[in-house]
Image (cartoon, grey):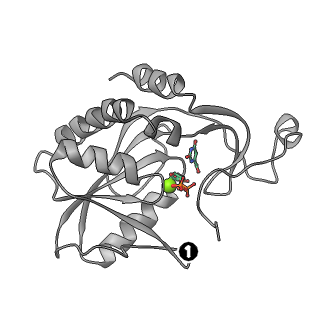
Amino acid sequence: MTRDDVLDVFRSCGAILEGHFILSSGLRSPVFIQKARVFQYPDKTEIVCKALAEKIRAAVPDGVDYVVSPALGGIVPGYETARHLGVPAVWVEREGGEMRLRRFELPEGARVVVVEDIVTTGLSSRETIAALEALGAKVVACACLIDRSDGEAEVGVPLIALAGFKVPAYPADQLPPELAALPPVKPGSRNLA
Ligand SMILES: O=P(O)(O)OC[C@H]1O[C@H](OP(=O)(O)OP(=O)(O)O)[C@H](O)[C@@H]1O
Ligand SMILES: O=C(O)c1cc(=O)[nH]c(=O)[nH]1
Ligand SMILES: [Mg+2]
């Protein structure tokens, strides 16, 4: 799939929103990719995740044993990508703010690809990778459907993005006036009680 094919899938599902958004990192942006609007459709989700699985196979020829995704947004694409890779899909989730593998065990040395929905700063991916490495897993790559940094985010392992989509994001104290004029909303799950 080309970058435009991927973005067309997101657009066709009404997943590219405009307004004033508080991102997981705390940055503010006039654009938010509401991936859940794609993931509500199994056929659309299959199209993008099959393409991501093919990209992972090409980038990691020795293969992976597990897909691990950060909840909440990573769970559906992680599962669907794992289906195409033929490996199990598990997830980490926040407990007291920290990413933890609460429901599963990984064998020592398991080869893992982290599958994210969206990467913006790479913070959630880095937290996920650190949690997995602390358990003895070998994280061989991180993959995402859309990289909002378009290659700038550093996650410490190769980042495989199905599409890059550079969108502006600003620190909360450096908002352009047109963004400051809109009430902010925070669609993601980080810091939810
Ligand atoms: O690269 P980053 O700056 O970390 O931003 C990207 C992260 O933000 C979103 O998660 P969020 O914490 O908003 O919660 P969600 O997964 O429930 O949507 C998204 O799912 C990524 O995990
Ligand atoms: O950075 C984020 O939190 C983020 C951006 C985006 O466009 N979509 C999303 O789900 N999260
Ligand atoms: Mg997330």
Closer to us: 43 or 29: 43
The answer to whether residue 66 is left or right of residue 183 is left
Q: Residue at x 41, y 56 (%)?
A: 155
44 relative to 151, above or below: above
Q: Secondary structure at mark 1?
A: loop
Q: Residue at x 86, y 43 (%)?
A: 180
Rendered-image quadrant of the N terminus: top left
Sort mark 1 into few (<14), some (14-19) or many (20+) by Cα contacts within 10 Å: few
Ligand 1 within 8 A of label 1's CB? Answer: no
35 relative to 129, above or below: above
- The answer to whether residue 173 is visible is yes
154 relative to 138, above or below: above
Q: Position of residue 145 (x, y in %)?
A: 40, 39
- The answer to whether residue 35 is visible is no
The number of callouts visible is 1
Mark 1 lies on residue: 97
Closer to us: 146 or 49: 49
154 relative to 164, above or below: below
Q: Residue at x 24, y 70 (%)?
A: 137
Quadrant for residue 135, please give it: bottom left
Q: Position of residue 127 (x, y in %)?
A: 45, 67
Q: Position of residue 128 (x, y in %)?
A: 40, 65
The answer to whether residue 176 is left or right of residue 145 is right
Q: Position of residue 65 (x, y in %)?
A: 16, 59
The answer to whether residue 27 is left or right of residue 66 is right
Closer to us: 146 or 159: 146
Q: Residue at x 64, y 66 (%)?
A: 192
Amino acid type, callout 1: Gly
Rendered-image quadrant of the C terminus: bottom right
Question: Which residue is outermost to the left?
Answer: 62
